Structures are given as structure tokens and as C-alpha cells.
Image (tube, grey):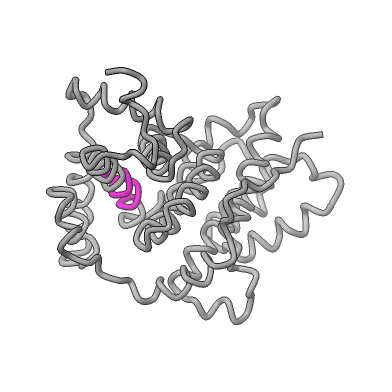
Amino acid sequence: MSAKNRCFNKKRLTLRTICFLMRRLAVAILLLASMLTLGINANAQVKNGVHSKLAKYFENEQWEDLAFKCDKMMVLEKYKNDAELYLYSAYAYAKIFTMCLDDPKLLDKTPEYLQSYDLALRYSVNAKKKDKKTKILFPDNDDLLKDIAVIGMYYVDHYVSVKKYSKANSKVRKMLKTYSDDNFITLQGCLAAITGDTATANPIMRNLELQAEKGKRREKDEAKKILNLGLKFFPDEPVLVYDLEIAKNPEYATEHAKPENAKKADFMVKASAITDDDDDDDDEDDE
């Protein structure tokens, strides 16, 4: 196939290509979003750390206390390049974001929590930069970075559901600065192609096509496995049942609307309205 025929230009997408992209997008979202349903690693800890007070907050899941303590420490000169501090803060704000999804009334007390996930991404990138030379924290704590990135699937799922693919693509680009694996790269490729970012999409989609032709990818089966496991813990959960049907047949979505999670919808509408322009934020550089 020629490079010209492989070009996923938004203006020239064929029906076959669109179906291919949407199937890949649905599977990628299923794989990542299903991790949220089963819960983020409850036993996660910051490895190789030295801040015992922060570790205690982390262990007790006192996310607001942890974020507040980190905010106070960050303004001190002695901690300006402390990668561990930024990792703790990033994880705390990611968890605060999920707390707001469960209880939007937290915003009445602390309106700035609307931007909690943006802070989580920013601080996680800072943590990686500050650890670049010493390599004390990473890759040993990559599992925490993965948790932070996966939590962002709440945004991606929301944007895709309302067909704001550029917003979803922008969010994924930022998530990839925190953590990357095959599923996130697949997600990026699909969204980039749909939004016309061919420079990003073409190499990813070519690789996906080659792998699909060779029968080496098993995303759909993996998605079904994860979703079935989720249904064991949450029987008859409407969103899980819906996602499982899509995993079996992506065309299911054309005739059935996704069930809404009312308690999360209100927060996501507010949060997505004030964040995620299409320009990447400038991240703090090491000195």
C-alpha cells in the first residue's frame, strides 16, 4: 500500500477507515477505562522515598492532607528539586480528582479542585524531570505514573462521548507525558487520525494495521476479560454491561446510548469547560 493511500487525512477518510479507527478507539478506551472500574492499585506506595510524614498520609489515603502538605513544602527552596515531593503531590491531586467525581460538593469548599487533574499531570512530569539525573524514583514508581494517566480516562471518555475529539486528543497528549504504553499509543493514534493530525497518526496507524494483519493484537479479547472480571465485582453494572457489548460488537454503540453516570456527569461538564485548550501547558524545567 502506497504512502498516499495510507494517509489518514481527515478530509479523505473512507467509511472503512472510519470504522477501523472507531473500533480501535473503542477497544483502547475499553482497556484503559476498565482499569478505573476495577480500581487503581490499592497497595501502591512510593518506593525509595525518604519523606516519612508524606508516606503516612499516602498510606492512610489522606489525599487532601497530602496535597496541602506538599503545597507548603514546594515553596521552600530546599525542596525545589525534590522529585519525591512532586510525585506525592501528583498522586494526591489525581486522587482528589476522583474524590470530586464521587462527591462534587467538595467543590463548594475548594473550587480550585476543578483543576486537580491538570495539577496531577503537571507535577508528575516535574517529578520525572527532577529524577532524570539521579534515577532514584523511576522506573521503580512507574506504576504510580500509570495510575495517574489512567485516571485521565474519565476526561477522554467524556470528550469522546460528546464527540469532542480534539479535546480528547489534547488530553491524551498530556497524559502521554506522564506515562505511555501500547494502549495509550493506540488511543493517541486513533484520536490523532480522527482530528486530522496525520503526522502523529500515520506511523501509529500503519503499525496497527500491520499488527492486525499478522493477527498479533488481542485488545478486544483482553477488554472482554477485564470487563467480565469487573462484572464479577459489580454485577449488572449498566456501564460495564454496555462496554462489554461494545467489546463484542463495536456497532452496538450505533443503536444504543451509553448509560450515564449522573454523579460524575455534573463535575465532568464543569471541569472540561475550564481546562484542556488545544495548546500544551509549559512544564517547569529543571535548573
Question: Which residue of the protein is positioned furthest toward the top in this rendering?
Answer: 2
> Which one is nearer the viewer's eye here, 257 or 40?
257
> Which one is nearer the viewer's eye here, 141 or 282?
282
49 left or right of 94?
right
Magenta residue check for 32: yes
Q: Which residue shows up at 38% across the image and 42% down it?
A: 11
Q: Which residue shows up at 52% across the image and 48% down it?
A: 170
In which quadrant will I find the C terminus? top right
54 left or right of 155?
right
Q: Which residue shows up at 59% across the image and 66% down it?
A: 274
> Which one is nearer the viewer's eye here, 111 or 171?
171
Q: Which residue shows up at 23% across the image and 55% down it?
A: 230
Magenta region's main secondary structure? helix
27 left or right of 110?
left
x, y (%) of residue 198?
A: 44, 33
Compared with residue 44, is residue 271 higher up or lower down, i.e. above or below?
below
Magenta residue check for 100: no
> Which one is nearer the viewer's eye here, 165 or 96?
165
Which stretch did the figure color magenta?
A: 27-35
